[in-house]
Structures are given as C-alpha cells and as structure tokens.
Amino acid sequence: MKLLITGFEPFGGDAVNPSWEAVQALPEQVGHHQIYKLRLPVVFGQAADLAIAEADRLHADVVLAIGLAGGRKAVTPEVIGINLRNAGIPDNAGLQPHDDPIIPSAPAAYFSTLPVRAMKEAICAVDIPVALSYSAGVYVCNDVMYSLLHHFADTQVRCGFMHVPYLPDMGTPSLPLEKITAAIKAAVGVL
C-alpha cells in the first residue's frame, strides 16, 4: 500500500516545523505501507494542490497530512475539515483570506476517511498524549485536509489530517520529536 505523508515548512517566524521534522524521521516502510514523504509550503491553495498532485502521481492508497497546532498539548487526529479559509496571520506567500470558501459551491464539510478513533487508541497505547480534534482550524492545515477530502470523495483513496504540538525548544505545551514520530508511526499502523 502506498501512503503519502505530508508535513509543512516553517511559518509564523519559527525556524522549524515539527510536522516536517517528524515526517522526515519516519522510516521508508511502516507495516504494510510504503511511505512517501512530501514537504508542503504554508500557502493557501498551493499546499493542497501539491499534495493532491503527488497523491495522484503516486496512485496513493492513503494520504495522511501532518501539521503544527502550537498550543495543543497532544497529538490530535482531525475528525472534520470545513470549507472555509480564515487567516489570523498571512501565509508564507502573504495571503490572508477572511471567511472565504476553499471551493465555492462545494459541501460545507467532509469527515476524515481515516479511522481516527483507532488512530487515537494506537497512539494512546504507546503512551503519547492524544485526543480527537473536531476542528482543524481555518488556516492552511484545514485547507489541505478539506481539499484532499473533496478531491478524493467517492474514490478508494482514504485521506486525513493529524496535528502535532510544538517541539520543546519552540514553546509549551510540547512533545519531543521522538514522541511525535512514534505517534505518527502508531497511527500509520492502523491505516
């Protein structure tokens, strides 16, 4: 099975983004999944377009996007993506939309097609703080999640998103990189 896992470049003045650091640290194979990795820009539209194009090119079976949610104390598989862009800060291209739809006339929301509860239990089993999240926000992370779910609706490709906390030197709350990477591996194990 081909699994595309994405992480993001740094944004908002940070020197690193734990989502990409953890994705880079993953092995090339986890269980029966061949892992393909892609670093995304923190840019509305562009990040989603790159993820979709790479998933299509690979004929991926599963797409798991990883993003940073500074201030969260746990790894959080996302349950739902919504059709809304709203930026408190500009993205890395200077875009700062306010209450714009991601895809006009598309559904208001899509639920993850990944087994988010099983992912949560698998992460809990390796003793890493985890919780389900019912809001992927309205920044570029949600943009990617919603766009993937829209593009792959009514196909066999399963998609979802998971947020990770800061690394310890970035702020609090935080998790060490090794724990974030272990959480992703545990989640992949049930996909």
Image (cartoon, rainbow, N blue to C red):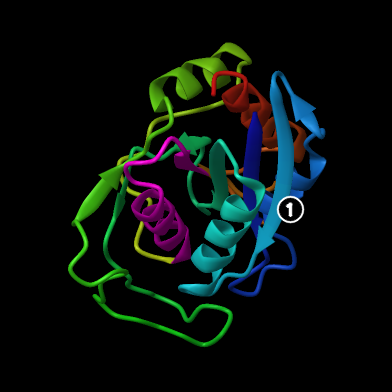
Q: Residue at x 62, y 43 (%)?
A: 174
Q: Residue at x 33, y 46 (%)?
A: 153
Q: Front-most of 173 and 181?
A: 181
For residue 154: magenta?
yes
Q: Residue at x 26, y 76 (%)?
A: 100
Q: Splitting the image into 4 quarters, where does residue 50 fall?
A: bottom right
- Residue range in magenta is 140-162
Residue furthest bottom in the image: 94
Q: Is residue 127 left or right of residue 178?
A: left
Residue 4 location (% of width, % of height): 64, 44
Which quarter shows the C terminus? top right
| Type of the residue with mark 1 | Asp
Residue 133 location (% of width, % of height): 36, 38
Q: Which residue is mark 1?
A: 169
Residue 125 location (% of width, % of height): 57, 12
With respect to residue 185, does 10 lie above or below?
below
Q: Front-most of 172 and 126?
A: 126
With respect to residue 134, does 132 lie above or below?
above
Q: Is residue 95 left or right of residue 16?
A: left
Q: Front-most of 41 and 3?
A: 3
Q: Specify whether residue 164 is in view.
A: no
Q: Splitting the image into 4 quarters, where does residue 60 fall?
A: top right
With respect to residue 130, does 143 lie above or below?
below
For residue 137: magenta?
no
